[in-house]
Amino acid sequence: MAASPLLALGFLPLLAMQSPWWENYDIRERFLCGDRFSVVLERNASQASLIAGGARSTLFREESDAPGLRYQNESLRVILRGDELTLEQLPSRRICLRSEEV
């Protein structure tokens, strides 16, 4: 299985990207996924945008009884539980920790 372009580009510096105003994300947070890999998660009640390197993925809220907020698209799922963000592109999984609100 080929690696996600989002994760493959993850070691590039995070660009100062922002979502368009019409997506109206209420919250913007930065997470560190190891020493050199960081992501920004912009989110609202129904969707999220994950930004890493120069790549952006739009995800939609997944209704679930499992703990945490879950957003997914056809190839990626993110799970937010407290200060921990899990990036899943099965069989790969990466854990990131909140570093700051942006």
Image (spheres, rainbow, N blue to C red):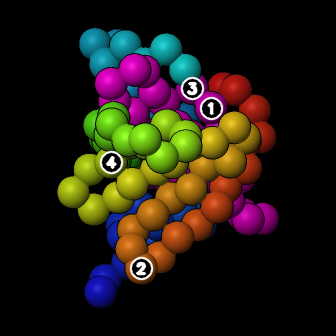
Q: Main secondary structure of the magenta part?
A: strand
Amino acid type assigned to the residue bearing label 4 in the image: Gln
Residue contact between numbered discs 2 and 3, judged by CB atoms under 8 Å: no
Q: Amino acid at mark 2?
A: Pro
Residue where numbered disc 1 is placed: 29
Q: Which residue is mark 4?
A: 72
Is label 4 in contact with label 1 (beta carbons under 8 Å)? Answer: no
Q: Which residue is mark 3?
A: 28
- What amino acid type is highlighted by mark number 3? Arg
Tell me which segment is drawn in magenta. Answer: 28-54
Q: Position of residue 21 (x, y in %)?
A: 35, 13
Q: Residue beneath label 2, please? A: 91
Examine the rendered structure and indicate whether residue 34 appears above or below residue 49.
below
Eye-nearest disc, 2 or 1 = 2
Q: Is residue 11 visible?
A: yes
Q: Is residue 71 above or below residue 7?
A: above
Residue 12 relative to residue 92: left or right: right
Q: Going from the N terminus, do you reach mark 4 or mark 3 first? A: 3
Binning the other alpha carbons within 10 Å of mark 4 as few (below 14), some (14 to 19) or many (20 upward) gives many
Residue that protrudes farthest toward the front in the picture: 65
Q: x, y (%) of residue 74?
A: 21, 57
Asked if the magenta segment contains residue 94, the reply would be no
Rendered view: 27 above or below 7:
above
Number of numbered discs on residues: 4
Rendered residue at 75%/32% (across/down): 100
Q: Nearer the viewer, mark 4 or mark 1?
A: 4
